[in-house]
Image (spheres, coloured by chain):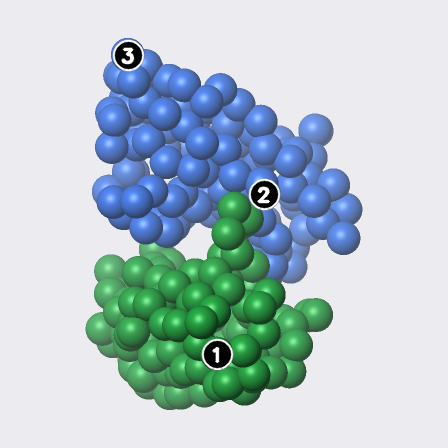
Amino acid sequence: DIVMTQSPLSLAVTPGEPASISCRSSQSLLNRNGNTYLDWYLQKPGKSPQLLIYLTFNRASGVPDRFSGSGSGTDFTLRISRVEAEDVGVYYCMQALQTPFTFGPGTKVEIK
Amino acid sequence: QVQLQQSGPGLVKPSQTLSLTCAISGDTVSNKNDGWGWIRQSPSRGLEWLGRTFYRSQWQTDYVPHVMGRITINPDTSKNRLTLELNSVTPEDTAVYYCVKTRALGQGIVSWGQGTLVTVSS
């Protein structure tokens, strides 16, 4: 199975400030079709996870443009340009290159 | 807007079978663009993909290897729902179980059920 790691595991951010989360995979997530199969999800407190980013940098429907994804191969980043109070929760990266899909351990984002 | 409504018992005895149902509205389980699966979440294992089923020219299913032999994910086209059965459960199977919809071509897990906490205990 592909192993996913994330850093940091927790993050406290001042509203309006940027935030960045890193994700690394144990093998390249680049498919022969040219797409890189890395997703980002946010699990708000008490809720089911929700899709933020798919295929490394594509924002899901309804996701604010302050969220952006980047990266290639085995190294990826989720950036929030200006954190808002509603962004608190746990952020997970997930590889969708091969089954079983696997998730990172999560990064808990709190507001200072 | 797709909605996934989960149902099933919250308590299962060790060695018995965990059974959950996911009623799908706003879409059909045999949609050739999508897949349907189950994910669970526990403090010890985090988010864990269990498996999925999808229809192209025929039904295909894949499972995470370490539960293969104990797990069955079935589409029920007559009732437009998805079912999960996990046999011979142990306390390690205690988790919140989510029904999910996945888009084809790597477009992500676009819908999640509300989650069902299943506790395995005598």
Q: Which chain is blue?
A: B
Compared across the picture, whether A95 is left or right of B102 comes to left
**Image quarter (top left, top right, bottom left or bottom right) of the N terminus of chain A:** bottom left
Measure the C-alpha gap from mark 3 to mark 2. Answer: 27 Å
Q: Which chain is green?
A: A
Q: Position of residue A62 (x, y in %)?
A: 70, 70
Q: Secondary structure at mark 2?
A: loop
Amino acid at circle 2: Gly
- Pick the front one: A34 or A82: A82
Q: Position of residue A52 (x, y in %)?
A: 56, 69
Image quadrant assignment for residue A102: bottom left
Measure the C-alpha gap from mark 1 to mark 3. Answer: 46 Å
Q: Are marks 3 and 2 on the same chain?
A: yes
Q: Which mark is residue A14?
A: 1
Measure the C-alpha gap from mark 2 to mark 1. Answer: 32 Å
Image quadrant assignment for residue A11: bottom left
Above or below: residue A73 compared with residue A109? below
**Image quarter (top left, top right, bottom left or bottom right) of the C terminus of chain A:** bottom left
Protein chain holding label 2 = B
